[in-house]
Image (cartoon, rainbow, N blue to C red):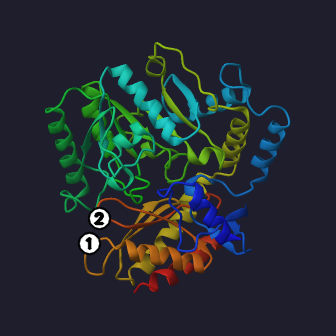
Amino acid sequence: MTKDLLGRHRAVLPDWLALYYDDPIEITHGEGRHVWDAAGNRYLDFFGGILTTMTAHALPEVTKAVSEQAGRIIHSSTLYLNRPMVELAERIAQLSGIPDARVFFTTSGTEANDTALLLATTYRRSNTILAMRNSYHGRSFSAVGITGNCSWSPTSLSPLQTLYVHGGVRTRGPYASLSDDEFIAACVEDLTDLLGHTRPPAALIAEPVQGVGGFTSPPDGLYAAFREVLHERGILWIADEVQTGWGRTGDHFWGWQAHDRSGPPDLLTFAKGIGNGMSIGGVVARAEIMNCLDANSISTFGGTQITMAAGLANLTYLLEHDLQGNARRVGGLLIERLRAVAAQVPAVREVRGRGLMIGIEVTRPGTDEADPQAASAVLEAAREGGLLIGKGGGHNTSALRIAPPLSLTVAEAEEGAAILERALRSIG
């Protein structure tokens, strides 16, 4: 059955639509932190549908909310008043930390970042964007144009002029040997110098932890230091929280809060986990920025009632069960366990991350050279052992990505770590 489905997939879908595994699997159902494939195999899920299944598979509270809303009305568009959309917007505005916040809902993180770029360039009357090297912001034409990761950027054409800044990767690049304070100072100096060579940009867009790039991040405080330079020039800061939001990093509810000395971002984008698998994205911005558009706009499917019901139930569950605290506690145990394993595996260059957002960088032993074949071998070995993980990376890097649902238990973390240990040891 799976081979037949694979053949049909290849016959009608694009060649560039990636599939994991030499023998791809069809996931048919899930519960808690586990999923099952069409052959009946059970897996511990450490990737959560690319960080979208944030709380748990088949979470009863979300399933009930979706079912009840579907029995009333599924969709009406933003042309009509929508109670679930207003209620979720109120909660997100309050949680965002942005003063006088307005919220606009989309259907994905890509569309959220598109909207943030539209707002920033309109507000600032500039089409120049600052972005981070090794970044990823989505699949659309404009989002691809600002993505600083060539593996995910199939064209150099763009409606925007993009300038790339140092700082998203702490342990590689020209400043890797510096102390954290020296690293931040060097990146700020680079940013300041760059701004002297260009027309005034609209905004800097940055992921607090770079997702597709392999869960890399700068020292805490870098974006606060950037913010001071940007604020002096009126340049906006867009925090791309599509992967880091909702408490996944454990220490903070939003990734930007590790860089909050200079205040919140001007715009914040979100998606993925808030819907627990339902398609929700959005932008939060100060009212003066959100309201700068002088033409009509709607969102046909953004804010639709059924996804808003899911988001409300999911967010309520996350807050009432302190899943941010769980991510901090269980994630801390998991990362230390993996670092102990990695110390005995020469192919592992680094285990990094925070909370339940953990990256394992794989290289050829004794070098800093990426080894994508080894990373793929670990992915396959983990799957054979009953564990699903992700992978990523940027310029000459290959990394395994670990991002389970935030309700992960200590026992499940230990089980996953044991499977990963065997998978890592299999590559020597």
Q: Is residue 4 among what the camera can see?
A: yes
* The image quarter in which residue 143 lies: top left
- Label 1 element class: loop
- The dot on residue 396 is 2
**Residue at figure coordinates x 40%, y 31% from the top left:** 117
Residue in the image at 71% along x and 42% along y: 310
- N-term mark: 1 or 2: 1
Say above or below: 195 vs 36: above
Q: Position of residue 87 (x, y in %)?
A: 69, 29
- Front one among 328 and 307: 307
Image quarter in which the C terminus is found: bottom left
Contact? badges 1 and 2 (CB < 8 Å): yes
The amino acid beneath tag 2 is Asn
**With 188 as the anchor, is 5 left or right in this view?**
right
The vertical placement of 368 against 76, above or below, is below
Is 180 above or below relative to 74?
Answer: below
* Element assignment for label 2: loop
Tell me the amino acid under the disc marked 1.
Answer: Asp
- Judged left or right of residue 344, residue 323 is right
